[in-house]
Image: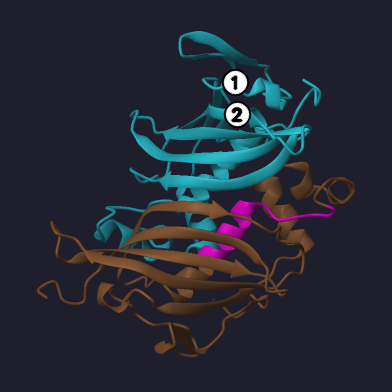
Chain colours: A brown, B cyan
Amino acid sequence: MNGEKSHIHPSVGPVRAGGILACVTDASGRVTRYFEDYIPGLTVDCGTFSLSEAEIVAFAKEYDPQPFHVDPAVAAAGPAGGLIASGWHTTSMMMRLLVEHFISGETALGAAGIDEIRWPRPVRPGDTLHVRASVLEARRSRSKPDRGIVQSFIEITNQDGETAMTMKATNFCLTRDPQT
Amino acid sequence: MNGEKSHIHPSVGPVRAGGILACVTDASGRVTRYFEDYIPGLTVDCGTFSLSEAEIVAFAKEYDPQPFHVDPAVAAAGPAGGLIASGWHTTSMMMRLLVEHFISGETALGAAGIDEIRWPRPVRPGDTLHVRASVLEARRSRSKPDRGIVQSFIEITNQDGETAMTMKATNFCLTRDPQT
């Protein structure tokens, strides 16, 4: 995360997964993770973000111009009871935090797919959204031993502890040691 | 779609679904669809978009700064063989065409979820990406008869006819007639 994005506040420090101290990220959040580091049960705290009304409207005008994403007055009178962020805005902000705290640019080989995106609570201007990533499964490729496939569960909670979004991601990732 | 976005070219005209003339969109692509209009088998041609190298890099710097999305030289030397778009950029562009051609602002009540996003082929600068939406299932809400739930399959193909992305979307939508 570059310094200008003052609305993004990475969390730093050890994270417990299943009661075991699982991972420590440094102050910059830059840890190079290889396939071997994605151990099922590992949970990584990816920090928080928030979106202003102006940011929500700007993104939605470009990519998702539904009334409840672009027009605060219409949104206030409708079932949403106020402006809410495009779900694709939330996934995009989440992705930035995943790239900075969970996925390593040196080892990532892209995503095979995304499953089960759910948005049980809307994201509203000024909400503090907390992103956590947990490793569900990890298996080495049989045909290409230099890489593995990691399935993760991503959860975003708001300042009230409510779940705003969940999804599962399946990513390819380089192994540290292709021989083991 | 506003006039300035010259890289987006909505297709207009009748679309055949299962051999039956299923839907005609007008020149502006603005058709108000209610729940009753989302008949399983309906396929809607949502037009095309393309992304320049500069657009791919700008989106990825903001939301998905992995090397193969932001650095053409690194991307060219890596397994992608050149710069490729963030999958979230592709979903966001897709969403704009869905809002303009498939989902109606007057009736849409948001998405319950997204399933099975797959990106079998990368999106590269200058590709022409064609978006189609097909209705898989539609059922009226039992508890709230003013709305229904529509499940759709979205497919994006490139200029070579290769599938670049697929996903399933589940959306809430107002009924035209809550009584029937």
Boundaries of the magenta span: A81-95
Furthest-left residue in this view: A179
Position of the N terminus of chain B, as image quadrant, is: top right
Q: Label 1 is placed on what type of residue?
A: Ile
Furthest-front residue in this view: B142
Position of the C terminus of chain B, as image quadrant, is: top right
* Image vertical order of residue A54 relative to residue A79, above or below: below
From the image, give the main secondary structure of the stretch colored magenta: helix
Q: Point out residue A163 in the picture as x, y percentages from the top left corner.
A: 63, 66
* Image vertical order of residue B123 relative to residue A155, above or below: above
- In the image, what residue occupies the spot 36% across and 70% down? A105
Q: Secondary structure at mark 2?
A: strand
Q: Quadrant of residue A150?
A: bottom left
- In the image, what residue occupies the spot 69% across and 27% down? B35
Q: Quadrant of residue A48?
A: bottom right
Dot 2 alpha-carbon crowd within 10 angstroms: few under 14, some 14 to 19, many 20 or more:
many
Left or right position of B70 against A157: left
- In the image, what residue occupies the spot 39% across and 33% down? B158
- Which chain is mark 2 on? B
Furthest-top residue in this view: B20
Closer-to-camera residue (A78/B50): A78
- Which chain is mark 1 on? B
Tell which circle, 1 or 2, labels the residue nearer the N-terminal end: 1
Q: Label 2 is placed on what type of residue?
A: Ala
Dot 1 alpha-carbon crowd within 10 angstroms: few under 14, some 14 to 19, many 20 or more:
some
Q: Point out residue B165 in the picture as x, y percentages from the top left corner.
A: 42, 40
Q: Point out residue B30 in the picture as x, y percentages from the top left corner.
A: 71, 24
The circle on residue B138 is: 2
Closer-to-camera residue (A68/A142): A142
- To which residue does mark 1 refer? B39
Would residue B54 be seen by someone viewing this image from the given angle?
no
